[in-house]
Amino acid sequence: MSERISREELVKIYNIEITFFDELVDYGLLNIQIENNTHYLMYEDLPALEKFANWHYDLEINLPGLEVIHNMLKKLDALNRRNRELMNKLSAISDQYEDI
């Protein structure tokens, strides 16, 4: 089983409001596990929480803004991956024609 940390511990460690954490979950920005009425975040999702907390508290970006930024960055990442795939295919085609 992967390591996880409770919502209550996260609130203390990161000095964030519990409502902020719950809103991140409500907006679908964080995925949690619930066991015995305790909310847990997986350790692998901590970088996302840290990113959202920094954007929210340091840059004063509201939750809808966090959602928009997050979705745009996901789309940008997907476009970059697709661009790399297409460039690799183009390079392979180009190499084939050079051999002729």
Image (tube, rainbow, N blue to C red):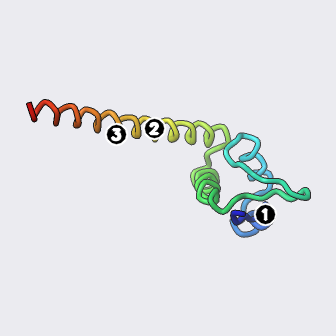
Image x and y of residue 69, in percent: 55, 40
Above or below residue 57? Residue 65 is: above
Above or below residue 17? Residue 29 is: above
Considering the numbered disc 3 on the image, is that residue within a helix, a strand or a loop? Answer: helix
The label shown at residue 65 is: none
Q: Is residue 94 left or right of residue 84?
A: left
Query: Which residue is identified by label 3?
Result: 84
Number of on-image labels: 3
The label shown at residue 6 is: 1
Dot 2, crowdedness within 10 Å: few (<14), some or many (≥20)? few
User: Given the image, on which type of amino acid does mark 3 rest?
Assistant: Arg
Q: Quadrant for residue 82, please give it.
A: top left
Query: Which residue is identified by label 2?
Result: 76
Q: Earlier in the sequence, mark 2 or mark 3?
A: 2
C-alpha distance separating marks 2 and 3 = 12 Å
Q: Residue furthest front?
A: 100
Do the residues under discs 3 and 1 have CB atoms within 8 angstroms? no
Image x and y of residue 8, in percent: 81, 64
User: Given the image, on which type of amino acid does mark 2 rest?
Assistant: Leu
